[in-house]
Every structure is written in structure tokens, then in C-alpha cells.
Image: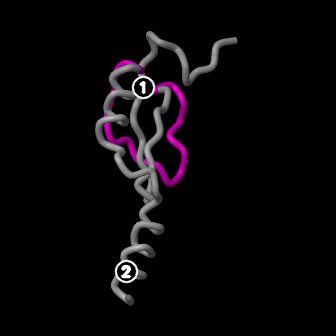
Amino acid sequence: MANPFEISDGSYYVLINAEGQYSIWPSFVEVPAGWTIFYGLETRQSCLDYINAHWNDMRPNSLIAATAAERERK
């Protein structure tokens, strides 16, 4: 059985969570709690390209905020 996240001719969404993390998601699988459809319905490659173009900082939002707060305290 093929991995549903790796079907090249499948339809996908790009999801995002509250931490600003992205995920590619097969369209036929229910979106998990805490995640929102951010882009798609598109091809797998289009979704991967979108993620590569827009997710430049892999740190979760809470870590970004904590780092900024630490800098302000210095």
C-alpha cells in the first residue's frame, strides 16, 4: 500500500497549526484538530513548493516569541 503522503498524482492541502508549522495533507484524510487548511487543493508538488517558499523559519511561534522576549530583557 502506498504512503498517502507520497502519492505524486494525489490531491493535497497545506495545513498550518497555531505554532506556525506547516504540513502537507492528503485531501481524503480528515484534517486533524488544531490544524487549518492554508493552501490547496493542489498537487503534491505544488503544496511542497508552497511550503518551501513560505516556511522560512522552522522554529515554532512560541519559541520565536520566547527568543524575542529574551532579547528585549537584555
In the rendered image of this protein, does residue 52 appear above or below residue 36? above
Residue 12 circle label:
1
- Residue 67 against residue 4 in the figure, above or below: below
Residue 36 image offset from top left, x and y in percent: 41, 47
Instruction: Locate residue 2: give its quadrant.
Output: top right
Q: Residue furthest bottom?
A: 73
Q: Nearer the viewer, residue 73 or 11?
A: 73
- Residue 23 appears at what percent x and percent y? 47, 39
Tell me the amino acid under the disc marked 2.
Arg
Q: Position of residue 8 (x, y in %)?
A: 47, 12
Is residue 56 rendered to the left or right of residue 31? Answer: left
19 is within the stretch colored magenta: no
Instruction: Determine which of the numbered discs, if any, sits on residue 56 in the image.
Output: none
Q: Secondary structure at mark 1?
A: strand
Mark 2, Cα crowd under 10 Å, few <14 / some 14-19 / many 20+, is: few
Q: Secondary structure at mark 2?
A: helix
* Residue appearing at x 54%, y 30% in the figure: 29
Q: Residue at x 63, y 19 (%)?
A: 3
Residue at x 49% of width, y 27% of height: 26
**Residue occupying the point 44% across, 51% down:** 58
Q: Count the labels in the image.
A: 2
The quadrant of the picture occupied by the N terminus is top right
What kind of colouring is applied to the model shown? one colour
Residue 39 highlighted magenta (yes or no): yes
Percent coordinates x, y for residue 51 in the rendering: 36, 36
Q: Amino acid at mark 1?
A: Tyr
Q: Alpha-carbon distance for marks 2 and 1?
A: 39 Å
Magenta span covers which residues? 27-44
Q: Quadrant of residue 38?
A: top left
Numbered badge on residue 71: 2
- Of the 4 image quadrants, the one containing the C terminus is bottom left
How dense is the environment of label 1, judged by Cα within 10 Å: few (below 14), some, or many (20 and up)? many
